């Protein structure tokens, strides 16, 4: 595996110097942030980003995300033009040495939480999803950091209605069209496209979400039978639904060579199905992180990994879920498990 860390560019309070000092860090996962969804990223911006990262002896081989314009997901308006722009972005990123692109197909809202700074028992602050809060939330009157903030309330209301009308099957149809269009470009450029599962893996605000479980992931992967059409397997997103057996999914899709990027984090699922983002440590949450890393190890995973959301600890203030300290602890923990697995398998192979 290749350990990486998400970096939000020059405005990120976490610096490349700091990231560089995390043991085992090989590269950052980033994006050009000042171009609206649907548009082509200027070559100069890509180049500048890459040079800045390389100056710090880190690589820029993973982009998260190249956002998919809502017109593409809705199959309306300027979707054909936006798909052409998407292909051009794949080409431009490949030219700059990018090997893997993470994206998602969640209608309007990316990850959804009800509180961004819930104090946990140990005094740290975390992102949480409490079902009873979400039931009372009005997406027209709020915005979360992962969401596209460029829509006003009227546009948002129109979008939500359009997705409600489109329904699950309509969304599948548009996803299939998009995949059939872009994957040939990804193959030509030798870039791995890894879709991020829906977070959480169930419909929110009455609009469909489809990358949620094994059955749907099987359907998704069948759209195009090629290893460049794959997954960003996010343990914390799929893991919110305890029906998703994360190590089993890793073994299955890893053996088929369909995981290009691993997001590794833990969550604590509560009795009513709500969840809190815990530290990465297995016993703090509901997922068995050693088993998750063992599954990656057993399938000989050589792709990119990043610790995912962290809590805010030690008084850190920063971008929700993306501070330095807890994610760095997550990386160290993942590296520790991996080193043990390497040594044990090495020892076993000698006897
Ligand atoms: C949350 C992230 C997601 C992810 C996108 C990928 O923190 O994992 O926002 O970047 O869904 O397109």
Image: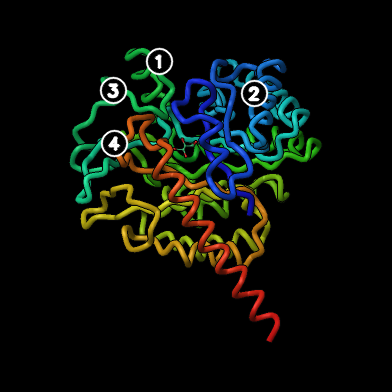
Q: Decide which of tag 2 and tag 4 comes sooner along the chain.
A: 2
| 325 versus 46 height, above or below | below
Q: Is residue 141 left or right of residue 170?
A: left
Q: Choose mark 3 or mark 2, whichever is in front.
A: 2
Q: Nearer the viewer, residue 252 or 346?
A: 346
Q: Decide which of tag 1 and tag 4 comes sooner along the chain.
A: 1
Q: Residues within 10 Å of mark 2 (few under 14, many from 20)?
A: some
Helix, strand or loop status at disc 4: loop
The span from disc 1 to disc 4 (Cα, nearest Å) is 33 Å
Q: Choose mark 3 or mark 4, whichever is in front.
A: 4
For disc 4, the marked residue is 315
Q: Residues within 10 Å of mark 1 (few under 14, many from 20)?
A: some
The span from disc 2 to disc 4 (Cα, nearest Å) is 29 Å
The span from disc 2 to disc 1 (Cα, nearest Å) is 27 Å
Q: Choose mark 2 or mark 1, whichever is in front.
A: 2
Percent coordinates x, y for residue 150 in the rendering: 43, 15
Residue at the (73%, 39%) spot, across then down:
191
Q: Does the residue at mark 3 contact the one at mark 4 (Cβ under 8 Å)?
A: no
Helix, strand or loop status at disc 2: helix
Indicate the quadrant where residue 313 lies: top left
Percent coordinates x, y for residue 154 in the rendering: 34, 12
The span from disc 3 to disc 4 (Cα, nearest Å) is 26 Å
Q: Decide which of tag 3 and tag 4 comes sooner along the chain.
A: 3
For disc 1, the marked residue is 151
Q: Decide which of tag 3 and tag 1 comes sooner along the chain.
A: 3
For disc 3, the marked residue is 142
Q: Does the residue at mark 1 contact the one at mark 4 (Cβ under 8 Å)?
A: no
Quadrant of the image for the C terminus?
A: bottom right
The CB of the residue at mark 4 lies under 8 Å from ligand 1: no
For disc 2, the marked residue is 49
């Amino acid at each position: 595996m290749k350990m990486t860390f998400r970096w939000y560019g020059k405005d990120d309070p976490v610096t490349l110097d700091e990231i560089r000092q995390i043991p085992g860090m090989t590269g950052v996962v980033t994006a050009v942030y000042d171009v609206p969804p649907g548009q082509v990223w200027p070559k100069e911006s890509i180049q500048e980003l890459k040079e800045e990262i390389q100056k710090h002896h880190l690589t820029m081989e993973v982009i998260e995300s190249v956002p998919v314009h809502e017109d593409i997901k809705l199959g309306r308006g300027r979707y054909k033009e936006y798909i052409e722009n998407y292909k051009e972005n794949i080409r431009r990123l490949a030219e700059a040495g990018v090997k893997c692109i993470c994206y998602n197909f969640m209608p309007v809202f990316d990850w959804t939480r009800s509180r961004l700074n819930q104090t946990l028992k140990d005094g740290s602050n975390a992102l949480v999803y409490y079902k009873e809060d979400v039931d009372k939330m009005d997406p027209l009157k709020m915005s979360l950091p992962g969401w596209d903030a460029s829509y006003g309330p009227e546009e948002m209301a129109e979008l939500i209605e359009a997705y409600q009308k489109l329904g699950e099957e309509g969304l599948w149809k548009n996803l299939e069209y998009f995949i059939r269009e872009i994957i040939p470009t990804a193959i030509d450029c030798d870039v791995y496209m890894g879709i991020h599962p829906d977070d959480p893996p169930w419909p929110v605000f009455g609009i469909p979400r489809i990358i949620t479980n094994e059955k749907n992931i099987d359907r998704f992967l069948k759209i195009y039978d090629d290893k460049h059409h794959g997954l960003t397997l996010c343990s914390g997103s799929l893991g919110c639904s305890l029906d998703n057996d994360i190590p089993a999914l890793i073994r299955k899709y890893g053996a088929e060579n369909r995981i290009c990027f691993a997001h590794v984090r833990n969550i604590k699922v509560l009795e009513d199905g709500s969840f809190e983002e815990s530290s990465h440590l297995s016993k703090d949450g509901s997922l068995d992180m050693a088993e998750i890393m063992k599954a990656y190890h057993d399938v000989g995973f050589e792709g990119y990994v990043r610790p995912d959301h962290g809590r805010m600890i030690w008084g850190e203030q920063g971008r929700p879920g993306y501070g330095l300290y807890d994610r760095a602890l997550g990386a160290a923990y993942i590296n520790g498990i991996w080193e043990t697995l390497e040594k044990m398998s090495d020892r076993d192979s000698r006897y």
